[in-house]
């Protein structure tokens, strides 16, 4: 059953409910530790119940921190997160539980996997250390939780604006965008760093000054995080060394598919060999286009990348991203995503008002899979003050088979139909992002029958594969034609326009992989590889930019202070996850051949890739679906197709 209450969540309700969860979890731990002669089988269910209580607390509080409009609720949620994190470390350092799990005989396969993973988690928390070092490990973990919260809050609460110097600086932007940006009381038009404002400017605005200053404003957000990130990386390194690892990178990558920093470097080098030539060839085309405006140009600025990419596509493929915007109205896109996933994966979405929705714009749906109740989703899709400005999926309730159904939440920042006079039009890339994030959501729903909380998640560097996998469908005319109609004429999107979209879509892929994902992989690893622990993170990233980036960089900004991914363990040394998962997603697509709407294959993917969760290693899931181990052939063919 879904956990619900009759009234919207308040600070008091949040406090009371989660105090009860902590109390139940603590009682379970005390009982477990009192049974000194217990074996693994007697500990599995109590530990799973503890995991469920803490997961419910952390999930609910995570949603409140990121999206709840009431600061008192957000502050209460942060405090509860800190307490739950400290309690989790106490559980993970329980020597009676650890010893009992070591007495494991005659277990079923899922029980064995549960025991194996939980004992690994406990070892990584310091259960085998002496008492003083266990205490120190708990203290460092508490500090990381607090610093991570500070980092996220600083980004969430810092929206910057750039004032136009003249109306002419809106030249090149879509008419619906210019209509939505009117002068304020002082007569000036201001553009925010929120994604719905930022992306169109960087793509279409003729004004180089506006693009450059808006990027500078975006990179200057959360300057206090320079010190926070320095302390995060220093504390992570100290904890890793205390636990017996050479660096945080070794600790962070140990439980992932890649395994070690050395293996990650080999992967980066292998991708670099293909990505760099493709990126350089694309950069040459951008520079040639820039020279139309500036004949003496010798470089392309990072603030010019999207603008000149769009111009190259317009000339080379007769495709201008503005041309597709009138076909991508937010509400129709939302419905299309629901319809597509219903068709592919046997899901049905029934609108419902979530009893505790935290904002009136939140939409919720009860979900069935093959006619069986399978949980709920909520969509919080538009920017507002006090809300996280990024794009992600997170659980409100983690599914536990036979106990509680999943409730997954999307946090996005797309144009808001309620905030514009006309239709809320989306960029095609925003629609791709929508499909990506919905892929996470589908993954959470499909694995809702997994009985053990610890087995509901797969290796961290596999988690982006199902979301990246779903992006492909938004380039398919059979999908677009089901919903993409012109907001003025009602005409369906022409086949010829989709053909040009498809022809243009892959231009820039080399730069996306090399400058975006590959550079991010290098940067997150460099921040955590132990070679410059305690250094100013700006210096580390600027040095990488000097050595690897093909673009002229903005100097003197606060970046990477606003790099959202750096505030928690998941992506800390492991931003390569996006790149790794892209290689897997490209391989998974090969099973579909030329027919993305093959429902039989889609549901085999659902059952063999999504539904098992972490009950098997991710490499086995891929092999079960493809009939072979995954490899990089499809990715390399896509990234650098033959001339």
Image (tube, rainbow, N blue to C red):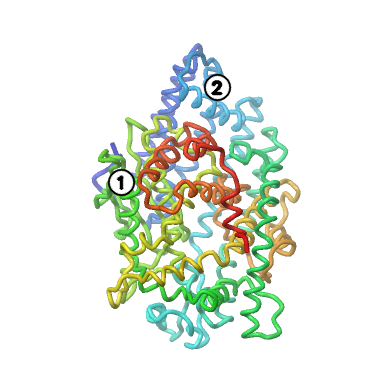
The residue indicated by pointer 2 is: 98
The residue indicated by pointer 1 is: 347
The N terminus - image quarter: top left
Indicate which label's residue lies in the foreground, 2 or 1: 1
Residue 145 badge: none
Q: Is residue 93 above or below residue 456?
A: above
Quadrant in the picture for residue 494: bottom left
Q: Secondary structure at mark 1?
A: strand
Quadrant in the picture for residue 316: bottom right
Residue 609 position in % (x across, y down): 45, 40
| Residue at image location 42% in from the left, 79% down from the top | 174
- Asked whether 336 or 622 is in front, the reply is 622
User: How many numbered marks does the figure carry?
Assistant: 2
Labels 2 and 1: the sequence-earlier one? 2
Q: Is residue 229 left or right of residue 106?
A: right
Q: Is residue 354 above or below residue 39?
A: below
Outermost residue on the top side: it is 37
């Amino acid at each position: 059953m879904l956990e619900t209450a009759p009234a919207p969540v308040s600070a008091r309700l949040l406090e009371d409910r989660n105090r009860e969860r902590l109390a139940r979890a603590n009682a379970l731990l005390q009982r477990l530790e009192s049974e000194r002669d217990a074996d693994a089988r007697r500990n599995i269910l109590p530990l799973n119940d503890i995991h469920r209580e803490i997961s419910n607390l952390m999930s609910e509080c995570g949603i409140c921190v990121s999206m709840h409009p009431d600061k008192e609720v957000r502050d209460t949620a942060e405090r509860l997160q800190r307490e739950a994190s400290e309690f989790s470390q106490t559980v993970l350092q329980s020597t009676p539980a650890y010893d009992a799990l070591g007495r494991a005989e005659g277990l079923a396969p899922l029980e064995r996997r549960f025991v194996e993973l939980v004992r690994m988690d406990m070892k990584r928390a310091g259960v085998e250390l002496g008492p003083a070092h266990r205490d120190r490990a708990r203290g460092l973990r508490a500090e990381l939780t607090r610093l991570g919260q500070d980092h996220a809050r600083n980004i969430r609460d810092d929206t910057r604006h750039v004032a136009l110097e003249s109306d002419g600086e809106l030249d090149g932007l879509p008419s619906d965008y210019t209509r939505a940006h009117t002068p304020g009381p002082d007569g000036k038009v201001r553009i925010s760093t929120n994604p719905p404002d930022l992306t169109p400017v960087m793509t279409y605005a003729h004004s180089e000054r506006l693009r450059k200053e808006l990027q500078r404003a975006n990179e200057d957000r959360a300057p206090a995080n320079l010190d926070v990130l320095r302390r995060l990386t220093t504390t992570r390194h100290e904890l890793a060394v205390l636990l017996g690892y050479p660096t945080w990178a070794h600790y962070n990558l140990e439980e992932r598919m890649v395994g070690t920093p050395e293996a990650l470097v080999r992967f980066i080098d292998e991708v670099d060999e293909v990505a760099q030539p493709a990126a350089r060839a694309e950069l040459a085309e951008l520079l040639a286009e820039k020279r139309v405006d500036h004949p003496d140009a010798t470089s392309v600025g990072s603030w010019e990348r999207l603008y000149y990419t769009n111009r190259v596509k317009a000339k080379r493929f007769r495709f201008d991203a503005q041309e597709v915007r009138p076909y991508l109205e937010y509400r129709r896109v939302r419905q299309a995503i629901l319809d597509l996933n219903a068709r592919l994966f046997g899901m049905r979405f029934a609108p419902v008002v979530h009893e505790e929705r935290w904002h009136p714009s939140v939409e919720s749906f009860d979900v069935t899979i093959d006619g069986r109740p399978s949980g709920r989703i909520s969509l919080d899709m538009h920017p507002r003050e006090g809300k996280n400005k990024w794009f992600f999926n997170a659980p409100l309730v983690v599914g536990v088979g036979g106990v509680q159904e999943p409730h997954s939440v999307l946090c996005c920042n797309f144009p808001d139909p309620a905030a514009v006079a006309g239709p809320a039009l989306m960029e095609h890339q925003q629609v791709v992002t929508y499909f990506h994030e919905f892929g996470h959501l589908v993954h959470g729903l499909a694995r809702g029958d997994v009985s053990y909380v610890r087995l509901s998640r797969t290796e961290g560097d596999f988690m982006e594969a199902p979301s990246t996998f779903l992006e492909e469908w938004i380039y398919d005319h059979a999908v677009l034609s089901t919903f993409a109609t012109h907001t003025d004429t009602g005409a369906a999107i022409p086949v010829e326009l989709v053909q040009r979209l498809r022809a243009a879509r892959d231009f820039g892929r080399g730069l996306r992989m090399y400058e975006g994902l590959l550079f991010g992989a290098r940067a997150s690893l460099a921040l955590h590889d132990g070679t410059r622990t305690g250094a100013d993170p700006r210096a580390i990233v600027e040095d990488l930019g000097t050595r690897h980036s093909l673009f002229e960089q903005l100097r003197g900004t606060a970046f990477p202070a606003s790099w959202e991914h750096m505030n928690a363990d998941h992506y800390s040394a492991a931003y390569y996850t996006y790149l790794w998962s892209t290689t897997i997603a490209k391989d998974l697509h090969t099973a579909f051949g030329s027919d993305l709407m093959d429902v039989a294959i889609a549901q085999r993917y659902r059952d063999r890739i999504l539904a098992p969760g972490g009950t098997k290693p991710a490499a086995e899931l891929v092999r079960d679906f493809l009939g072979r181990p995954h490899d990089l052939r499809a990715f390399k063919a896509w990234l650098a197709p033959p001339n």
